[in-house]
Structures are given as C-alpha cells and as structure tokens.
C-alpha cells in the first residue's frame, strides 16, 4: 500500500510540473511541445484514475 501512495504522490507532482511546462510552452509558442505535454497529462491522469480504482477495490476486500 505504501508503494501505491508514493506512486500517487509522484503522479501528482508530474501533473503539476507538466501544467507549468504547458503554460511555459504556450507562452513561448512551442505548440508541438504543448501538444506533447497535453498528451502526457492525459496519460498520467488515466494512470492515476486506474490507481485510485485499484486502491478502492483493494480497500473493499
């Protein structure tokens, strides 16, 4: 369970850092980088949702 909590913290930090990168890349007109960052944010959000569902399922047992 500790590993899953640490993984959740890492996902949160990654999302925060990627949001800052997204704002930076839009301000500098690096739109290709912006598209890549949006994709990474969506991917990490998907993984985070799967992790939350897995933890909820393990908590019910």
Image (cartoon, helix red, strand yellow):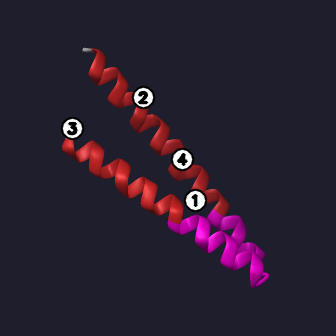
Secondary structure under badge 4? helix
Q: Examine the residues drawn in magenta and state their main secondary structure.
A: helix
Image quarter in which the C terminus is found: top left
Q: Residues within 10 Å of mark 4 (few under 14, many from 20)?
A: some
Going 43% across and 61% down the picture, which residue do you hit? 13
In contact (CB < 8 Å): disc 1 and disc 3: no
The residue to which callout 1 is attached is 40
Q: Position of residue 23 (x, y in %)?
A: 69, 72
Q: Nearer the viewer, mark 1 or mark 3?
A: 3
Please state which of residues 41 and 32 is positioned toward the viewer in this rendering. 41
On residue 45, which mark appears?
4
On residue 53, which mark appears?
2
The residue to which callout 3 is attached is 1
Image quarter in which the N terminus is found: top left
Secondary structure under badge 2? helix
**Is 22 on the left-hand or right-hand side of 31?**
left
Q: Of label 2 and label 3, which has the lower sequence position?
A: 3
| 35 falls in the magenta region | yes
Q: Find residue 54 and report its image quarter.
A: top left
Q: Of label 4 and label 1, which has the lower sequence position?
A: 1
Question: From the viewer's perspective, is residue 33 above or below residue 10?
Answer: below
In contact (CB < 8 Å): disc 4 and disc 2: no
Q: Of label 1 and label 3, which has the lower sequence position?
A: 3
The residue segment tinted magenta is 17-37
Q: Residues within 10 Å of mark 1 (few under 14, many from 20)?
A: some
Q: Of label 4 and label 2, which has the lower sequence position?
A: 4
Q: Of label 3 and label 4, which has the lower sequence position?
A: 3
């Amino acid at each position: 369970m500790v590993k899953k909590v640490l993984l959740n913290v890492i996902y949160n930090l990654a999302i925060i850092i990627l949001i800052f990168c997204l704002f930076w890349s839009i301000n500098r007109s690096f739109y290709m980088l912006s598209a890549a960052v949006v994709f990474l944010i969506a991917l990490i959000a998907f993984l985070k949702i799967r992790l939350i569902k897995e933890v909820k399922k393990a908590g019910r047992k």
